[in-house]
Every structure is written in structure tokens, then in C-alpha cells.
Image (tube, rainbow, N blue to C red):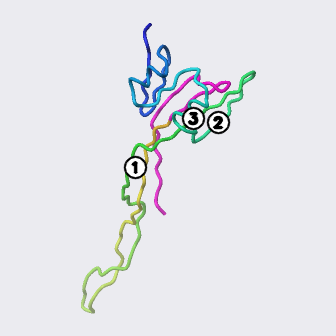
Amino acid sequence: MRTLTLALVGLLVSTVGATAADSRSARTKPVLEKGMPGTTIIQLVGKPDEINPIQAEGTHSETWIYRRKLDETVNQTANTQAYIPAMVGFDAGGVVIGRALVPEYRLKYIRNYQVTALLMVDGKLQLGRQWVAQDEQFAD
């Protein structure tokens, strides 16, 4: 029987074939399989950051969301401009004071996260999906 394993960054979800024990022996990352109970998933990768219930008749369904920071960068950005008093030259009477336009800088934090969403139906894993999400915030 062929084994199809979906390799996800930082988390593996085995969709068909091998058992979790077989997959763990070949890899060091946790392997999640379709049909795995939620309690086992929590033991392997921890509690989810977020649990979102799904309205479905006849089943108890929810989405478990995990977030892991991949990297963070900080950029200095010019957001606005301001006029400040400045010496702009000389004339017969001495120094001429005018206004100079200067940028006002703020720090911008850019964080990339690996987001993993697990569809849990009646307490068992049915589907897993991953993507990268970006969060940008300015320092106050």
C-alpha cells in the first residue's frame, strides 16, 4: 500500500497509510493522522491558540488554530512630516529663522506566522491546512 504523507512546515499530517508510530520513527516532527483523537493531538503539539465552533447538524465540529512565529523584522518608516524651527540663512540683520520640513519616524514590526488549522469533527481530526500569515504593527 502506498503511503501519502502531507508534509507541513513544523507539523506533519498523514492523510493515508502509515501509522503514527511508523511516521514518528522516520521523522522528528509530530505527525497527525486523520481520525486521531483531540487528546492525542494536544499531547503531541499542545493546546490550540484558538478554538472556533462550527455550526453543523448532528456533529460537534470545531476548528483548532495554532500559530507559531517564524520571524520578525523591524523597519524604521517615515509616516508623517513636521515643520520645525530652523536656521535657514543670514541677512543684514543676522540669522534668519524659518521652518524646515523633517520626516517623523516610527518603528514598524513585521511578524510572519505559520498558521495551522485543524478541522475536528466529533473530537477527531478530519483535515489539516497550513499557511503563512503576516502581522504588521507600529510601535507607540
Whether pointer 2 and pointer 3 mark residues with C-beta atoms closer than 8 Å, the reply is: no
Residue depth check, mark 2 versus mark 3: number of the one nearer the observer: 3
* Quadrant location, the N terminus: top left
Whether pointer 1 and pointer 3 mark residues with C-beta atoms closer than 8 Å, the reply is: no
| Number of numbered discs visible in the structure rendering | 3
91 left or right of 10 in image: left
Q: Is residue 16 above or below residue 83?
A: above
* Mark 1–mark 3 distance (CA, rounded to whole Å): 27 Å
* Mark 1–mark 2 distance (CA, rounded to whole Å): 27 Å
Query: Most extreme residue toward the top, as rendered?
Result: 1
Residue 136 spot, x, y in % from top left: 46, 50
Q: How busy is the neighbourhood of tag 2: few (under 14 within 10 Å), some, or many (20 plus)?
A: few
User: Considering only order in the chain, which callout, 2 or 1, is on the residue closer to the N terminus?
Assistant: 2
Q: Residue drawn 26% across and 91% down? A: 94
User: Considering only order in the chain, which callout, 3 or 2, is on the residue closer to the N terminus?
Assistant: 3
* Figure quadrant of residue 53: top right
Front-lying residue, 37 or 8 = 37
Tell me the magenta residue range.
116-140
Task: For mark 2, give the secondary structure.
Answer: strand
Front-lying residue, 133 or 42 = 42
**What residue does disc 3 label?**
42
**What residue does disc 2 label?**
52
87 left or right of 6 in image: left
Q: Is residue 11 above or below residue 14?
A: below
Q: Amino acid at mark 2?
A: Asn
Residue depth check, mark 1 versus mark 3: number of the one nearer the observer: 3
Whether 118 is among the magenta residues is: yes
Q: Residue drawn 36% across and 70% down? A: 101
Q: Is residue 71 above or below residue 54?
A: below
* Mark 2–mark 3 distance (CA, rounded to whole Å): 16 Å
**What residue does disc 1 label?**
72
| Disc number placed over residue 111 in the picture, else none | none
